Image: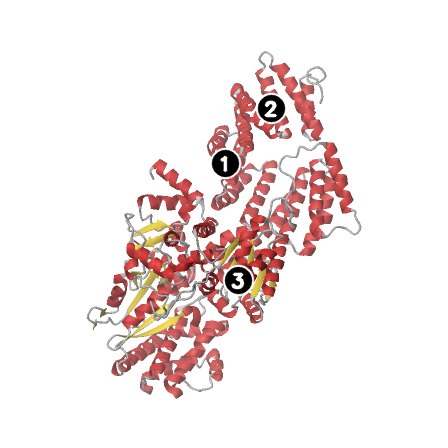
Amino acid sequence: MTDDAHRFHLDRHRAATELAPEHIPDFQRLLKDLCYGSRFQLLILDCRDERLRELLIARIDEVLEGRRLRPARLRLAPDDPADVPALEAVLATLAADHDAIHITGADAWLTDPRWRALNIRREAIAERAPARLLLWLTPEQVSRLPDLAPDLWAWRSGVFAFEAAPDEPRPAPERFDAAIDNRSLAQRSRRIAELRAYLAEDPPPPDDLRLPLLDELATLYEDLGEWDKALRIRREEELPVYERLGDVRSAAITQGQIADLLQARGELDAALRIRREEELPVYERLGDVRAAAVTQGKIADVLQARGELDAALRIRREEELPVYERLGDVREVAITQGKVADVLQAQGELDAALRIRREEALPVFERLGDVREVAITQGKIADVLQARGELDAALRIRREEALPVFERLGDVHSLLITRANIALALLQRAADGDRVEANTLLCEALADARRLRIPETETIERMLAEQGMDCDATAPMR
Amino acid sequence: MTESYRPPSDILEVLQQIEYEEPLGPDDPRYVDTREARGSQRTLDRLARKLGLLLADGRMYPPRQKHVLFFGHTGSGKTTELLHYATQLEGPGRFCIVQLDITKDLDRNNLQYADTLMAMARALLHRLDVAGVDLGTDALAPLDAWFSERVLTTEAGRELRTEIKTGAAGKGGIPGLVKLFASFTAAFKANATYKDELRRVIRNSFGELAAAFNTLIQRAEDALRDTGNGSRVVFIIDGTDKLRGEDTRLFFVHDAEQLLAIETLVVYTAPLSLKYEGNLAGKLDADLMLPMIKLAERNGTPCDAGMRAVRDILLRRADRTLFATDDDIERLVQACGGHPRELLRLLKLCCEFAEDDCIDAATVDAAVRQLASEYRRFLAPDDYALLAGIDRDGIHAGNDERTRRLLYNLALLEYNDGTWRRSHPVVRTLEGYARAAEAAAETGN
């Protein structure tokens, strides 16, 4: 190995020390291309996490500068440059005195028509901007690149994936919690106090650290039913920061969370307006077909809640399903099929709903090994059977297919709902011993509901009262 | 191989020299004769015959006009092969080859026949100028008259004329016209206002332009014959395979009659997808294709010539000493499916992954995995099912949009002039494909 090559290997290993192990191979490959590959290269970088991207750019630039290669940065804003010829001109200017150009902000800038325009300017770009072009994209954009710009794709010098570790905070934080949060009220209260103390520090934490804390706090308030507090944080603290940063995607996500809260409070019109006017157009402009489909799904949820079942059904079938099918996302397809079945069930088409659950949804979740979704779907199959009066079959499914899974998963919320449903079936069947067992189950469900402080508490209390039952003798409160 | 040529023996040097977009000229030591390997011994022969030349004995029976489309996969070597074909077709008693690359000469965004005609005229005049062939002013008169009467009277024409220092077109003979056409070609490429106005002029007076251009071509052929520079002109227009979507249809379908009005011999590169859209004008000759290099015959028997050729291509890019074993070379050869650019891509990945100056089994594994993962990004479950079905029973599988898309993005490769197809070997390593193949085997589809 030559001295130069030896030095290069040392430099790139040193530059990689801060990186997570899974990012090192692609990082090192990229550096080799940048330092030894040809002058013009189109390098596709798949990185959703902006903090990780910034770290990588800093490390890359250190190595380039150490080898006297001059890096530059082109930050694209939604309308700057105005179009592809303008982009070409900017790149040409930068390439005149730089060897490598990082292009960021492409997610919002690269609309479908711009991708297509860029595709046919491939040769011109190579000629006018003979530099290493590092195009930073999200995974979704990379997946669509071969179809939207096949010639650019054919000329790619490499694709490098930098997937964020799941526990890393992101500038566009997703809900920090998993679907199930079984922390006790005391635990949640302690965490709220902790978060409020962090946020009250002087000077306050920088935006990239503060935003995930705010998100977690808002989510905690939301889970505890303190929707006003959650709404205030989302509207007054999170949203303005994203807007100030020009982070349109995160702003849209936050708008979506505001809509979730309004929806939970029953303000359906307001929620619907936000989804249609603030959220959906952003995802469509960004070309994020998945997020757009998810939002369409939430619009359908609202319509469904307002009883506009036909409209909801149309969205599920025409706006949501085709997207997930095109993306090859079998899980989302199955979940959406389940929602189609919900509508059909509400319209009284029990057979059609049952067929979808048994033939379209259940086999997919079973194949994916998603035991939770299997149990939920089984529960809904039991709902149909119960509605048709097939009580024994419904009871069997709830006891043998659903209950054990939720117990194993520690999903207290689903568990208490399943217990209440079993109790209902038992009361309906009214065989010997059913009433006692139903009383026990309802009391167990009530204890958990009270512990979680969820709205179902009142429903279960009402059921007990209607049946003239109490929990003193049968199942002591835990 | 040229005796003095030594392929690079340093991994970083190999990496440095890989350029996907670089066609290999006739004297490039990295060029490998792939005719036997592609099963395309007859491709040049067939092209020559379409143009009226019997290569075996040099007899010429050129038709008055022929517009041939030359199909092939992206990156399969069409440009490189055409450069080599040109050397065989050119010469006294044969053809005078006039080459144009529209990707360099024109803006292939929204390319129209008008732009192409201007570029063809410029290229022909330039070729005559370089060959020192003088046509005399009467040969240039019709074209000159068309310019003066139709173009230079427009606003765009007047403005352009002031930019052309040599004055009126005819004044400087061929060099003057070359300059004039060069200005117009540049205007087509860069100036949207001029482009629209000039296109309108050409459309409104196309009959006159076609006649003037045809006169020029005839007189040029007379002069070329007299000076021993070939008896007919053949335009080779490269880059038209890179037109996309609506532009492809406009150029080859909607405006085909305008192209065909030019009475000459033309070869256009064309995208494979166009071949299967089934709406090409009958007069365009659309059955010539550059086949892929075959690594196996349709029945699975290994194709030694193909293996040898791909191995040769590889070893002219990277010295044999860089590979740990012959097995590693063999695996790279197999993994590219006979597609030259895919071979280079795999070689580049090996250079990126190699820790030392050695490409070993682990490096080849990593390269194949990486390339496969790039395919996984855009393949949908139905794509796998289609690919597995084609591989299973070797059916042609039709030419619907999905199939055309897979052919275009190389997940599906076509061999022997398109008579049979196979999935890309790296795609076959993906789990999605394995599942689809298993399902196809179970259902017998």
Instruction: Specify the quadrant that holds the C terminus of chain B.
Output: top left
Instruction: For marks 1 and 2, give the CA distance.
Output: 26 Å
Residues A333 and B278: in front is A333
Question: Which chain is mark 1 on?
Answer: A
Q: Which residue is mark 3?
A: A5
Residue type at mark 3 is Ala
The structure's colour scheme is secondary structure
Q: Secondary structure at mark 1?
A: helix
Q: Work out which residue is located at the far right of the displayed protein and give it.
A: A202
In the rendered image, the vertical position of residue A162 relative to residue B3, given as above or below: above
Distance (Cα) linking label 3 and label 1: 46 Å
Tell me the kind of residue under disc 2: Asn
Same chain, labels 1 and 2: yes
Which corner quadrant of the image does residue B5 belong to?
bottom left
Which residue is rendered at x = 59% and y = 61% of the image?
A63
Are dots 1 and 2 in contact, CB under 8 Å? Answer: no
Q: Which residue is mark 2?
A: A421
